[in-house]
Image: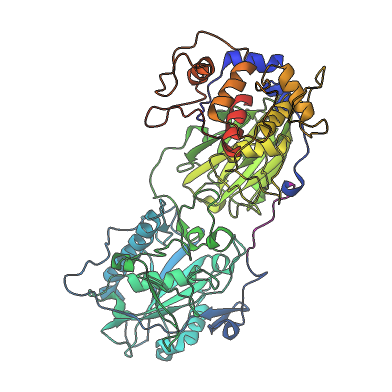
Amino acid sequence: MAHRTRRRTALVAALTALALGPVAVLGVAAPVPASASAPASAPTGPAEASTDCAAVGLEVAAVVDGTVLCTTGPEPGDPAVEAGAVAEASSGIQCYGDGASGARVQLVYAHPPSLNRLASLEPAMRTRAAQMESIFDASAAQTGGRRHIRWATDPNCNLQVLDVTVDGSALPSTNFTALINALVAKGHSDPDRKYVIWAETANANPSLCSGLATLWYDTRTGEENWNDAKTGYARLDETCVRSVFDGRTEAHELMHTIGGVQPGAPNATPAGHCRDEADRMCYDDDGAGGVSMRSVCSSANELRFDCGHDDYFYANAPCGAGGWLASRWNSADSRWLEAVAASAAPAPANDRLGAAASLTGYSGSLGTTNAGAGLEAGEPSPTGKPGGRSLWFRWTAPVSGPVAFDTCGSDVDTLLAVSTGTTGSMTGLAPVGASDDDSLLGRQSRVTFTAQAGTTYLVQVDGKGGEQGPLALRWGAPHHGYPDVALGAWYEAAVNWMARFDLIDPRPGGGFGPKTKMTRREVVNVLWRLADRPSARSTATFADVPATAWYLPALSWAVEAGLVKPYPDGTFHPGATVKRGHLADMLWRLAGTPAGSPASGFSDVASTHKLAPAIDWAAAEGLVSPYPDGTFRRKKALTRQQISVILFDLAS
C-alpha cells in the first residue's frame, strides 16, 4: 500500500467529524508499551582504555604524561611497489582552518646529530602524505562518505615537517620507547597531535617499508575513547620515502593511532589487525601462523581500509545501521579526520539565527550540510562543548505532546540544542534541552521534550569541534523502543507515533512484528484507538465474536460508523488478514464514500467490481499505487509496518 504526504481534504474532514482528526490524535499523551518504555543503551565497551598492554596482547610503548601507551610492536613491513603495479595516487592534501588549531596529524623527521637529510627527503614526505590522504578518502568513498586527514600545516596550506634531532640509539624500530621519550622531552606530546615519524636509521631494510605505532584497546564510542582523546605516535623507516613505496605503510600505522583495529571486532586478530584479505590492516600477526586468514575481498582493496565495512572503518553508516561498529569505536569517527573536503563554500542561509530554516509538520526529516557555516556573535554552544559550524531551524508545534529531534544519519559528530525564544535575539533563548552523544545513537544527538501546540522552538545543530559535512535532522514522536524496528527504517517514524500514542499493542515477547500480517480485529481496534476510543450506542453481534471479546468495543464502533458489516452468514472473520482491497474500502467508508473518482486503471480491478469505487478513490488520493505490472492485487495481505505508515500519514 503506497502513500503520499499531500493533504487529502475530504478524508481529513471525515476524520475530524469522527473525532479522529490529527489534532485530537496527536495531542494525546498516551502510555507507552511496557516493553518500549526505555530503550536499552547499546554496549560501548570497557569503562576505560586498557593500559595493561601485555594482558591484552600488546606491548608497552612509553609512558606519556602519566599515561601508558601500548603498541602492536614492530611489523613485517611492505615490499616495494612492483614494476607496472598501480601505486596510490598523490593528488595533494586538504587543508583546514589555520593548520594548527584542533586535532592535527604532525609529520616528523627524526635523525641523529650527524645526519640531516630533511631538505632532500621533504618532497617525498609530502608525496607520502598525499598518498595517505588518498587511501583514507578512497576508503571512505566505499561506504558513501569522505575522510580527509587534518594535517598540521602553515596558514598557506604547506605541510609542516618537524626537524627533530635525537640520539642515534632512539632511532631503530627496536627502541620505539626511546624515540617517543626523546620527542616528549622536546615538547612533542600534545593531546591534539598524532605524530607520523620517519626515523633515519642505518638498520632499516632498504627493500621494505616497516613501521609500528601506538594503539589502545578501547572500544568506547565518543570523545572518551583514548584513541580519540590522546596523543599517538607512528614510526616509519626513512626508507619508506624512497620512490618505490607509496604511503600504504604510513596509512596503516596512522590507522593504528586512531584506534584500528579493536579486539572483539568480527574479524580481529590477536594484535590489532584483521583477517580479511585483502585489506590495508589485515595480516596474520600471531607470529606462528595462528590466524586463519579469509580471502573475502579483491586484491584491489590492498590499499583500502575495512573491505567488509564491519571491523574498524565505516565512513557513512546509515541511521540505525547494525553490526559490531554500531555500538563500538569506529575509526572513521576520529577527530583527526574531516568528513568534507576543504573549500571556500558559502555559508548556508540558515547559518544565522535570524534566517533559521522552517520545519513543518509533526514529523519529518531533511538532509543538509554545515560546510561553510560559522558562529554568530553571542551564539551559545550546544551542551557547552565547542562547535563552531552551527545551523538554525525553527519549528512551530502543530499539536501538544511528546516529540524528539535527532541527528541520526549525519556523517559528522553532532551537537544539538532546542530552545524557545525569537529569531531576533540570541540573549532571549531559553533552553529546552541539549545533547551531545546519545546513548542510542552514539556520536549523534537527540533531544526529547513535551511540545506545546503553537509554540515555536529553535533548533541548533552543530558539528562538535568544528566538524563539517553532511548533516541529517529528524523530528517526530520519540523513539519507540521496539527491539525489532531498526533506527532509520522506512517505517520507523510511523512506529514511533503508533507506540507513543498507544495505538497498537506490542507482539507477544515485546517486539513490534513489522512484517506480521494484521487481522481484521487488530485494524478495527487501531482505528478505534485513533478515534479516541469512543463508545458505541449499541453492542455489535456477530456469530463468531464472543460477548467477552477484547476488541468488541472497537468492533461495535466500527459497525456503527459503517466501516465493517457482517458477512452473509453473520460472521466477522476477526482473525482474517486485512487485504489491500479491505483497507481501501474501510478508509473510503471512513471518508464518507465519496463518488466520482477517476478510474484507477489497475489491470486487475474491473470497473464493475464492488470495491472499484473505493480503490479508485484510494488511487486518486495517493493511498495506493500499482505494482510494476500494473496490477492492484486487492487480495494481498498488509503488514503492521505498512498499515502503520498509512495511518501515520493520514493523521499527520
Which residue sits furthest left? 84
Residue closer to the observer: 151 or 444: 444
Residue closer to the observer: 146 or 343: 146
Relative to 44, is 597 on the left or the right? left
Q: Count up the numbered dots.
A: 0
Q: Is residue 275 above or below residue 335?
A: below
Quadrant for the C terminus, please: top right
Identify the image quadrant of residue 592.
Answer: top right
Q: Position of residue 404 (x, y in %)?
A: 66, 39
Can residue 37 be seen in this snapshot?
yes
Relative to 477, is 72 on the left or the right? left
Residue depicted at 75% across the width and 21% down the height? 557
Which residue sits furthest front? 569
Q: Is residue 249 above or below residue 627?
A: below
Q: Position of residue 581 (x, y in %)?
A: 54, 25
Q: Position of residue 420 (x, y in %)?
A: 70, 32
Q: Is residue 515 above or below residue 14?
A: below
Which residue sits furthest top? 596
Residue depicted at 58% across the width and 29% down the height? 646
- Magenta-drawn stretch, dominant element (helix, strand or loop): loop
Relative to 458, is 284 on the left or the right? left
Can residue 421 be seen in this snapshot?
no
Q: Please tell me whether residue 613 belongs to the stretch shown in magenta.
A: no
Region of the chain picked out in magenta, as a range: 37-44
Residue depicted at 44% across the width and 75% down the height? 234
Residue closer to the observer: 502 or 430: 502
Q: Position of residue 134 (x, y in %)?
A: 33, 60
